[in-house]
Amino acid sequence: MTDRRNLVRDYKDREVEAGVYAIRCVPTGEVWIGGTPDLSTRQNGVWFSLRMGGHSSPSLQAAWKTHGEAAFGFEVLEVIDDKGLERLGRASLLVERREHWRASLSAEGLRR
């Protein structure tokens, strides 16, 4: 029981990095851009929703269904320094940076 408690404590105490990421479909060159308060868990969350067929982006879900998991890559584009920002400021900065990358790469934006 102590090991489990230590694992939970370590998980909660870990340093979390917010940032912007890209999902790329190699065969088509399509790119989707998202922002998240925790980059370390985002790929697993996106891949899980895609495998289950319930991702919020219809175009990403369709590309996944057509090309399969092996055709996709996950890339961190930018780590955001959000230290000292309140929750609203952190969220605004994340949206601003996500939109910057979306426009720069002519990509579709993801909600998360």
Image (tube, helix red, strand yellow):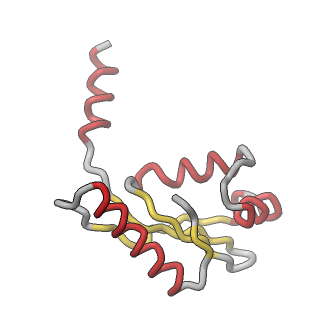
Choose top left, top right, bottom left or bottom right for residue 108: bottom right
Residue depicted at x 74% and y 75%: 27
Determine the image quadrant of residue 83: bottom left
**Nearer to me, 38 or 26:** 38
- The location of residue 28, given as percent across then percent down, is 74, 78
Where does residue 33 sit, x and y in percent of width and height? Answer: 54, 70
Point 17% across, 60% down: residue: 84
Residue at the far right in the pictured view: 66
The x, y position of residue 54, in whole percent, is: 71, 48
Q: Quarter of the image containing the N terminus?
A: top left
Instruction: Give left or right: position of 103 versus 60.
Output: left
Point out the residue furthest to the left here.
84
Residue occupying the far front of the picture: 88
Residue 45's place in the image compared with 23, above or below, is above
Q: Is residue 72 left or right of residue 95?
A: right
Q: Residue at x 74, y 66 (%)?
A: 59
Q: Is 71 on the left-hand or right-hand side of 91? A: right
Tell me which residue sits at (79%, 62%) in the image.
Answer: 62
Marker count (numbered): 0
Q: Is residue 73 above or below residue 12?
A: below
Figure quadrant of residue 111: bottom right
Q: What is the x, y in percent for residue 36?
A: 43, 58
